[in-house]
Amino acid sequence: MSKPSLHRRGFLRAAAGTAAGTAAIAAGAGALAAPAAARGRGTLVPRGRIGLQLYSVRDQIQQRGFTPVLGELADLGYKYVEFAGYTSPAEPDMTVPKLRQLLDANGLRAGGSHLGLDVLLNADTREREFENAVTLGMEYVGTASDFPGRTAAEIQAGADRFNESGEVARSYGLKVYQHNHTNEFGPVSDRPGERRHDVFLKGTDPRYVFLELDILWAFGASIRFRDQLGEFDPLDYVNAAPQRYIAFHVKDGVQDPAQTNQYRDVVFGQGELDFRRFFSGLRAPGVPLYLWEQDRAPQEPQGSIWAAEESYGAIRALRRRPGC
């Protein structure tokens, strides 16, 4: 597949920006300004950067469609959505341009999208997805798939593919990111004292490849692999390279050794993680996105939209110290 010209890429970016209009520009300026002001009031998570992974409410999107669900999420206070697909059987005529119109109509922004690994990395598929991302007004596009490789050489080969895809994405004005579960922090098969994630980090170019830290699964990895590699604090990874972490999955949970990720995720605020400590410990927080996710939200007795509402309120209530 031949690469589109830079002129075409520039046209796509300009066209998407025009569609958003001056309201989107103002929203972007507000989002960038919000963290400093919010931190000054003691709030740990700036309201203008709170979003969610739409997988959390997938049952509602499948049953009712994007149109009502995006409106409800905006009413709850969410500012960003991260996509996990662009179709719904409830709205068979939905298209990416129509999704952009829905976002704009509800004052929402597309914070990213989880693609399959091969879709993100293969030249035959990635550029179509980059065009979709531009249409939706994204800055980031990524994958929740494990990066390739078990040996050091295999992981480096996978990192090279990420670098190549990230360099192409940059010409669209996009940043490529990888989202973790626990597997990424396991041992390299031919270097059992080293974590796969560390090899991947060293092998990826910080200009082209970024990270979305799933906080709960990272803490789960510390438990899962502690006998082999010792425990670690995910906060240390972020503080070592803060500009590489463009988003967090703000996911809460309770320990459950029966789960591969070592935790069962729950409504935010009902779990065991000390998010106040984590967010207070960020030395150079920059302006990441804070994306709520609960894989099991559709299983909540009161429903996934209820879980989204409860979680948003609990995230907004996080402060540096009680009463601040």
Image (cartoon, rainbow, N blue to C red):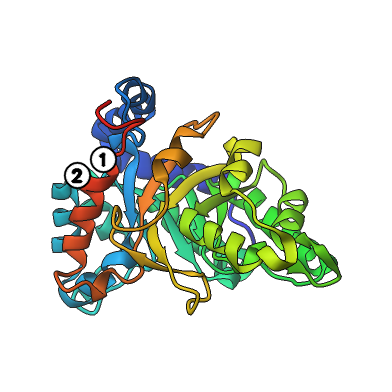
Q: Position of residue 276 (x, y in %)?
A: 40, 39
Q: Which residue is mark 1?
A: 316
Q: Quadrant of residue 120?
A: bottom right
The Cα–Cα distance between marks 1 and 2, rounded to whole angstroms, is 10 Å
Residue type at mark 1 is Arg
Query: The C terminus lies in which quarter of the figure?
Result: top left
Is residue 71 left or right of 89 when viewed as pictured? left
Q: Position of residue 230 (x, y in %)?
A: 70, 58
Is residue 306 left or right of 117 when viewed as pictured? left
Name the residue rendered at 48%, 53% in the picture: 215
- Earlier in the chain: of badge 1 and badge 2, it is 2
Name the residue rendered at 45%, 72% in the picture: 256
Label pair 1/2, CB-CB below 8 angstroms: yes
Name the residue rendered at 22%, 61% in the picture: 307
Asked whether 2 or 98 is in front, the reply is 98
Name the residue rendered at 29%, 57% in the picture: 270
Q: Secondary structure under badge 2?
A: loop
